[in-house]
Amino acid sequence: MSKKNKLLLFCILTFLVIIFYIWSKIIWVSLLLILIIDFFSLQYLSSKIKKFIPSPLWKILKIVYSIFLVLFFAIFIRVFFFEIYLIPSSSMESELFPGDIVVVNKLFYGPPLPQNLYDVPFGNILSSEQNINSECEHKRLKGVNSIEREDIVVFKNKEKETLIKRVIGLPGDTVQIVNSIVYINNVPLKEKATYCFNYLTNGVAKNKKQIKKYSNKDILDKLNLIRYIDTSYSAYGGIFPNNFIEDWTQDNYGPIIIPKKGLKINRPFNDDFYNKMAVEYDGIQSEKYFCFNYDYYFLMGDNRHNSLDSRFFGPIPEYSIIGKILLH
């Protein structure tokens, strides 16, 4: 490559780094990118360093540098742009199945920045979960769109488990489930053909063999099926907030107001529900009200009778959402 072309390449890539810095405001990553660009184009800095290092050592450094580049760009792409996940369970059937590989787009909502080394890809090798500082401020870079209802998202719950669910309730929505039908602001949510429910094959469930799962598109040619309504509280360890509130179940739940940033909810309205979120995530408590610092989302799996979701761990703050499913 001619010197002129190398200079042109350096200028183009440096311009992209400047855009990255304006977007992210992360100076050390931007400077590191410029140094890497120099190594592949002008080689100004590397030529200066090479003069002071013996040839055998320089060859070793080049190998180490090559390994560093692979790790750096693997982490860089996963933190700021895309990640690949494996579907771990059947909770999203019949849209996604266990073992499916999905690509998660972090640019859509804007990537959440790691709070600590443990949140960085491969960082768990050098740091343990016990070192997590829950008091750190949560930051997300600007994305191209906001989180919308029916989006399928990847997120982390309070236990740092990576899960994949569908967005059902948005910040400020009133969500209620009545006999397995979801109501948003008192309007029934239209069910997708891929949503799955348990059905009674003969009208009465005397044993588990008489309960079968069907998607909404599968039941079109089925007769004499009655949707199963679960009356048990104990599934997945109990309905959030795990204190037998109002005898809620996974098929009869709420109503609840999904917190949004700046929302004040007077106590004692669903006091245990909001108190648990305030303690676990972010809320400012007083004797008279709860005030929330973040937008929250109510997430559910498409396989409604076999999904660990917001019915069991509550609404999720925006900073816990990693990105939107792009390909599957």
Image: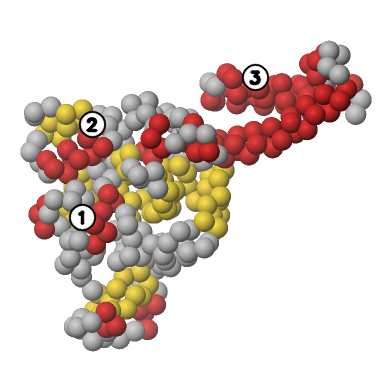
Q: Is the residue marked by circle 2 packed among few (<14), some (14-19), or many (20+) residues within 10 Å?
A: many
Q: Which residue corresponds to the image point at 36% horizontal and 65% vertical from the top-left?
A: 303
Q: Which residue does the image show at 57% across and 18% down from the upper left? A: 27
Name the residue type under label 3: Leu
List the residue tagged with mark 3.
Answer: 31
One can see residue 187 in this view: no
Q: Tell me residue 33's x, y (percent).
A: 67, 25
Q: Earlier in the sequence, mark 2 or mark 1?
A: 1
Mark 1 surroundings within 10 Å by alpha-carbon count, few (fewer than 14), some (14 through 19), many (20 or more): many
Question: What type is the residue that disc 2 sits on?
Answer: Gly
| Mark 1 lies on residue | 239
Residue situated in front as seen by the camera: 212 or 180? 212
Up the image or down, 235 lies above or below 315; here it is: below
Mark 1 and mark 3: span between their CA atoms? 48 Å
Nearer-N-terminus badge (1/3): 3
For the residue pair 82 and 133, the one nearer the viewer reads as 133
Q: Secondary structure at mark 1?
A: loop
- Disc 1 marks which amino acid? Ile
Which disc is residue 283 wearing? 2
Residue at 33% x, 42% y: name it: 158
* Distance between the alpha carbons at the discs numbered 3 and 2: 37 Å
Left or right: 39 in relation to 68: right
